[in-house]
Amino acid sequence: MTLGQRIREQRLRCGLSQEQVAEAVGVSRQAVAKWENGQSAPATGNLFRLAALFGTTVDLLLPVQEGKGMDSTRQVNILYRKPAGFQRQTCGRPSFWRNWRLALGVLAAYLVVYLAGRLSSIDWQAQSFTGWLWGMSPQQLPYLYGWLLHQKLFRVSLGVSLVPALLGRGRFAFASWAGFALGWGLGEVCGADPAGAPYGHGHYGWAIWGGIFLLSIFWGILLERLPRGRLWRMRGFWLRCGLYLAACLGVILAVRAGIPPSYGG
Protein backbone atom coordinates (compact mmCIF):
# COMPACT_ATOMS: atom_id res chain seq x y z
CA MET A 1 0.00 0.00 0.00
CA THR A 2 1.39 3.39 -1.00
CA LEU A 3 1.66 6.46 1.20
CA GLY A 4 -1.25 8.11 -0.63
CA GLN A 5 -3.46 5.07 -0.12
CA ARG A 6 -2.62 5.01 3.58
CA ILE A 7 -3.45 8.70 3.95
CA ARG A 8 -6.80 8.17 2.24
CA GLU A 9 -7.52 5.09 4.34
CA GLN A 10 -6.82 6.93 7.60
CA ARG A 11 -8.84 9.96 6.48
CA LEU A 12 -11.89 7.82 5.72
CA ARG A 13 -11.45 5.92 8.97
CA CYS A 14 -11.67 9.20 10.85
CA GLY A 15 -14.65 10.38 8.81
CA LEU A 16 -12.87 13.49 7.56
CA SER A 17 -13.18 15.22 4.20
CA GLN A 18 -10.22 16.40 2.18
CA GLU A 19 -11.17 19.98 3.09
CA GLN A 20 -11.04 19.20 6.82
CA VAL A 21 -7.66 17.52 6.52
CA ALA A 22 -6.33 20.43 4.48
CA GLU A 23 -7.54 22.94 7.06
CA ALA A 24 -6.01 21.01 9.96
CA VAL A 25 -2.64 20.55 8.26
CA GLY A 26 -2.51 24.03 6.74
CA VAL A 27 -2.51 23.21 3.02
CA SER A 28 -5.00 23.37 0.17
CA ARG A 29 -7.54 20.67 -0.61
CA GLN A 30 -5.81 20.14 -3.95
CA ALA A 31 -2.58 19.28 -2.11
CA VAL A 32 -4.36 16.59 -0.09
CA ALA A 33 -5.90 15.18 -3.28
CA LYS A 34 -2.45 15.00 -4.90
CA TRP A 35 -1.05 13.17 -1.86
CA GLU A 36 -3.81 10.59 -2.04
CA ASN A 37 -3.42 10.15 -5.81
CA GLY A 38 0.33 9.71 -5.51
CA GLN A 39 1.08 12.82 -7.59
CA SER A 40 3.11 14.33 -4.75
CA ALA A 41 4.13 13.53 -1.19
CA PRO A 42 3.71 15.58 2.01
CA ALA A 43 6.75 17.28 3.48
CA THR A 44 8.20 15.87 6.69
CA GLY A 45 6.42 18.38 8.91
CA ASN A 46 3.07 17.75 7.22
CA LEU A 47 3.59 14.01 7.56
CA PHE A 48 3.81 14.33 11.32
CA ARG A 49 0.79 16.62 11.35
CA LEU A 50 -1.18 13.98 9.47
CA ALA A 51 -0.11 11.36 11.99
CA ALA A 52 -1.29 13.59 14.85
CA LEU A 53 -4.58 14.33 13.10
CA PHE A 54 -5.30 10.65 12.47
CA GLY A 55 -4.22 9.61 15.94
CA THR A 56 -1.53 7.30 14.57
CA THR A 57 2.24 7.31 13.99
CA VAL A 58 4.36 8.06 10.97
CA ASP A 59 5.45 4.40 10.93
CA LEU A 60 1.89 3.34 10.13
CA LEU A 61 1.52 5.94 7.37
CA LEU A 62 4.73 5.22 5.51
CA PRO A 63 5.24 2.09 3.43
CA VAL A 64 7.24 -0.52 5.33
CA GLN A 65 10.52 0.12 3.53
CA GLU A 66 10.28 3.87 4.20
CA GLY A 67 9.11 3.72 7.78
CA LYS A 68 11.35 0.93 8.98
CA GLY A 69 13.60 1.99 11.80
CA MET A 70 11.93 5.39 12.35
CA ASP A 71 13.07 6.81 15.66
CA SER A 72 9.98 7.41 17.83
CA THR A 73 11.82 10.03 19.89
CA ARG A 74 12.52 11.97 16.69
CA GLN A 75 8.83 11.72 15.81
CA VAL A 76 7.84 13.35 19.09
CA ASN A 77 10.46 16.08 18.81
CA ILE A 78 9.46 17.08 15.27
CA LEU A 79 5.77 16.79 16.01
CA TYR A 80 5.92 19.22 18.91
CA ARG A 81 8.15 21.67 17.07
CA LYS A 82 5.12 22.82 15.15
CA PRO A 83 4.89 26.30 13.62
CA ALA A 84 2.90 29.09 15.24
CA GLY A 85 -0.81 28.88 14.62
CA PHE A 86 -0.87 25.10 14.15
CA GLN A 87 -3.46 23.53 16.40
CA ARG A 88 -3.03 19.88 17.18
CA GLN A 89 -6.12 17.78 16.53
CA THR A 90 -7.08 14.14 16.38
CA CYS A 91 -9.78 12.43 14.37
CA GLY A 92 -11.77 11.89 17.55
CA ARG A 93 -11.65 15.59 18.43
CA PRO A 94 -12.60 17.80 15.46
CA SER A 95 -12.17 21.57 15.59
CA PHE A 96 -15.14 21.88 17.94
CA TRP A 97 -13.96 24.95 19.84
CA ARG A 98 -12.83 26.72 16.69
CA ASN A 99 -16.31 26.37 15.22
CA TRP A 100 -17.89 27.66 18.41
CA ARG A 101 -15.62 30.70 18.30
CA LEU A 102 -16.74 31.29 14.73
CA ALA A 103 -20.37 31.05 15.84
CA LEU A 104 -19.80 33.53 18.68
CA GLY A 105 -18.16 35.88 16.20
CA VAL A 106 -21.23 35.65 13.95
CA LEU A 107 -23.52 36.42 16.88
CA ALA A 108 -21.39 39.42 17.81
CA ALA A 109 -21.42 40.68 14.21
CA TYR A 110 -25.22 40.49 13.98
CA LEU A 111 -25.49 42.17 17.38
CA VAL A 112 -23.48 45.09 16.00
CA VAL A 113 -25.94 45.43 13.10
CA TYR A 114 -28.89 45.16 15.48
CA LEU A 115 -27.56 47.91 17.75
CA ALA A 116 -26.61 50.08 14.77
CA GLY A 117 -30.22 50.00 13.61
CA ARG A 118 -31.40 50.93 17.08
CA LEU A 119 -28.89 53.77 17.40
CA SER A 120 -30.21 55.34 14.20
CA SER A 121 -33.61 55.82 15.87
CA ILE A 122 -32.63 56.74 19.42
CA ASP A 123 -34.95 59.15 21.25
CA TRP A 124 -34.51 59.05 25.03
CA GLN A 125 -37.26 61.57 25.65
CA ALA A 126 -39.90 59.45 23.93
CA GLN A 127 -38.97 55.98 25.18
CA SER A 128 -37.17 54.06 27.91
CA PHE A 129 -33.96 52.10 27.42
CA THR A 130 -35.81 48.77 27.22
CA GLY A 131 -38.28 50.30 24.78
CA TRP A 132 -35.41 51.51 22.63
CA LEU A 133 -33.66 48.12 22.78
CA TRP A 134 -36.68 45.90 22.09
CA GLY A 135 -39.41 48.21 20.77
CA MET A 136 -41.01 47.24 17.45
CA SER A 137 -43.07 50.35 16.70
CA PRO A 138 -42.73 51.25 12.98
CA GLN A 139 -42.71 54.94 13.89
CA GLN A 140 -39.55 54.45 15.98
CA LEU A 141 -37.51 52.35 13.52
CA PRO A 142 -35.96 53.00 10.10
CA TYR A 143 -38.15 51.52 7.37
CA LEU A 144 -36.02 48.61 6.16
CA TYR A 145 -34.67 47.78 9.62
CA GLY A 146 -38.18 47.57 11.03
CA TRP A 147 -39.34 45.50 8.05
CA LEU A 148 -36.54 42.96 8.59
CA LEU A 149 -37.48 42.62 12.25
CA HIS A 150 -41.24 42.34 11.64
CA GLN A 151 -40.81 39.75 8.88
CA LYS A 152 -38.44 37.70 11.09
CA LEU A 153 -35.82 37.99 8.35
CA PHE A 154 -33.24 39.17 10.85
CA ARG A 155 -33.50 35.82 12.64
CA VAL A 156 -33.56 33.86 9.40
CA SER A 157 -30.41 35.60 8.18
CA LEU A 158 -28.72 34.95 11.50
CA GLY A 159 -29.49 31.27 11.11
CA VAL A 160 -28.15 31.25 7.55
CA SER A 161 -24.82 32.54 8.89
CA LEU A 162 -24.75 30.74 12.22
CA VAL A 163 -25.27 27.14 11.08
CA PRO A 164 -22.38 27.18 8.57
CA ALA A 165 -20.16 28.76 11.24
CA LEU A 166 -20.89 25.83 13.57
CA LEU A 167 -19.89 23.52 10.71
CA GLY A 168 -16.59 25.32 10.23
CA ARG A 169 -17.59 27.29 7.12
CA GLY A 170 -16.31 30.62 8.35
CA ARG A 171 -15.96 32.18 4.92
CA PHE A 172 -19.58 31.49 4.04
CA ALA A 173 -20.70 32.82 7.43
CA PHE A 174 -18.71 36.02 6.90
CA ALA A 175 -20.04 36.49 3.37
CA SER A 176 -23.69 36.03 4.37
CA TRP A 177 -23.33 38.44 7.30
CA ALA A 178 -21.59 41.00 5.08
CA GLY A 179 -24.40 40.64 2.54
CA PHE A 180 -27.02 41.16 5.24
CA ALA A 181 -25.30 44.29 6.61
CA LEU A 182 -24.47 45.72 3.19
CA GLY A 183 -27.95 45.01 1.87
CA TRP A 184 -29.53 46.74 4.85
CA GLY A 185 -27.32 49.82 4.60
CA LEU A 186 -27.65 50.24 0.84
CA GLY A 187 -31.33 49.35 0.87
CA GLU A 188 -32.06 51.92 3.56
CA VAL A 189 -30.21 54.65 1.64
CA CYS A 190 -30.97 53.78 -1.98
CA GLY A 191 -34.45 52.32 -1.66
CA ALA A 192 -36.38 55.44 -0.69
CA ASP A 193 -38.91 56.79 -3.20
CA PRO A 194 -40.62 59.83 -1.61
CA ALA A 195 -42.72 60.47 -4.73
CA GLY A 196 -44.43 57.13 -4.29
CA ALA A 197 -45.12 57.53 -0.56
CA PRO A 198 -48.67 58.91 -1.04
CA TYR A 199 -49.52 55.77 -3.01
CA GLY A 200 -48.07 53.37 -0.42
CA HIS A 201 -44.92 52.66 -2.44
CA GLY A 202 -42.43 54.90 -0.71
CA HIS A 203 -39.58 52.44 -0.23
CA TYR A 204 -38.01 49.63 -2.27
CA GLY A 205 -35.22 48.85 0.15
CA TRP A 206 -36.63 45.37 0.72
CA ALA A 207 -35.88 44.47 -2.92
CA ILE A 208 -32.33 45.82 -2.72
CA TRP A 209 -31.68 43.96 0.53
CA GLY A 210 -33.11 40.71 -0.83
CA GLY A 211 -31.04 40.84 -4.01
CA ILE A 212 -27.78 41.66 -2.22
CA PHE A 213 -28.33 39.02 0.47
CA LEU A 214 -29.02 36.32 -2.12
CA LEU A 215 -25.87 37.33 -3.97
CA SER A 216 -23.90 36.95 -0.75
CA ILE A 217 -24.93 33.28 -0.59
CA PHE A 218 -23.26 32.62 -3.94
CA TRP A 219 -20.32 34.82 -2.91
CA GLY A 220 -19.82 32.72 0.22
CA ILE A 221 -19.87 29.50 -1.83
CA LEU A 222 -17.18 30.92 -4.12
CA LEU A 223 -15.03 31.95 -1.15
CA GLU A 224 -15.27 28.46 0.34
CA ARG A 225 -13.83 27.04 -2.88
CA LEU A 226 -10.63 29.07 -2.53
CA PRO A 227 -7.56 27.30 -1.08
CA ARG A 228 -6.98 27.58 2.64
CA GLY A 229 -4.85 30.50 3.73
CA ARG A 230 -5.04 34.25 4.16
CA LEU A 231 -7.77 35.44 1.85
CA TRP A 232 -6.51 38.97 1.36
CA ARG A 233 -3.30 37.61 -0.15
CA MET A 234 -5.16 35.69 -2.84
CA ARG A 235 -5.86 37.29 -6.19
CA GLY A 236 -8.97 35.14 -6.53
CA PHE A 237 -10.39 36.67 -3.35
CA TRP A 238 -10.21 40.23 -4.64
CA LEU A 239 -11.61 39.17 -7.99
CA ARG A 240 -14.61 37.58 -6.27
CA CYS A 241 -15.09 40.67 -4.10
CA GLY A 242 -15.03 42.92 -7.16
CA LEU A 243 -17.59 40.77 -8.95
CA TYR A 244 -19.80 40.73 -5.87
CA LEU A 245 -19.74 44.52 -5.47
CA ALA A 246 -20.43 44.97 -9.18
CA ALA A 247 -23.40 42.62 -8.88
CA CYS A 248 -24.67 44.60 -5.86
CA LEU A 249 -24.52 47.78 -7.91
CA GLY A 250 -26.46 45.98 -10.62
CA VAL A 251 -29.16 45.06 -8.10
CA ILE A 252 -29.54 48.69 -7.00
CA LEU A 253 -29.75 49.95 -10.58
CA ALA A 254 -32.25 47.26 -11.52
CA VAL A 255 -34.51 48.06 -8.56
CA ARG A 256 -34.37 51.80 -9.19
CA ALA A 257 -35.09 51.26 -12.88
CA GLY A 258 -38.07 49.09 -12.00
CA ILE A 259 -39.84 51.73 -9.91
CA PRO A 260 -43.09 52.64 -11.73
CA PRO A 261 -42.74 56.02 -13.52
CA SER A 262 -45.95 57.29 -11.97
CA TYR A 263 -44.27 57.09 -8.57
CA GLY A 264 -41.12 58.89 -9.59
CA GLY A 265 -37.56 57.46 -9.57
Image (tube, rainbow, N blue to C red):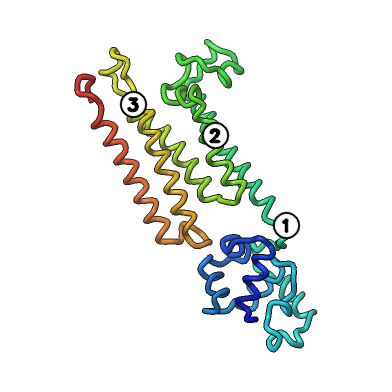
Is residue 90 placed above or below 149 in the rendered structure? below
Say which residue appears at 56% left-offset and 70% top-offset. 32
Say which residue appears at 54% left-offset and 34% top-offset. 112
Q: Earlier in the sequence, mark 2 or mark 1?
A: 1
> Could you classify mark 2 by the number of other residues whose Cα lies within 10 Å: few (under 14), some (14-19), or many (20 or more)?
few
Say which residue appears at 48% left-offset and 20% top-offset. 121
Residue type, numbered disc 2: Val
> Could you classify mark 3 by the number of other residues whose Cα lies within 10 Å: few (under 14), some (14-19), or many (20 or more)?
many
Location of the N terminus (image quadrant): bottom right
Who is closer to the viewer here, 248 or 40?
Answer: 40
Location of the C terminus (image quadrant): top left
Q: Nearer the viewer, mark 3 or mark 1?
A: 1
Q: Residue furthest left?
A: 261
Are dots 2 and 3 in contact, CB under 8 Å? no
Q: Looking at the rendering, which quadrant does residue 208 occupy?
A: top left
Q: Position of residue 192 (x, y in %)?
A: 32, 24
Q: Earlier in the sequence, mark 2 or mark 3?
A: 2
Who is closer to the viewer here, 213 or 174?
Answer: 213
Write down the residue under mark 2.
112
Write down the residue under mark 3.
204
Write down the residue under mark 1.
93
Who is closer to the viewer here, 173 or 140?
Answer: 173
SS state under label 2: helix
Residue type, numbered disc 3: Tyr
Residue type, numbered disc 1: Arg
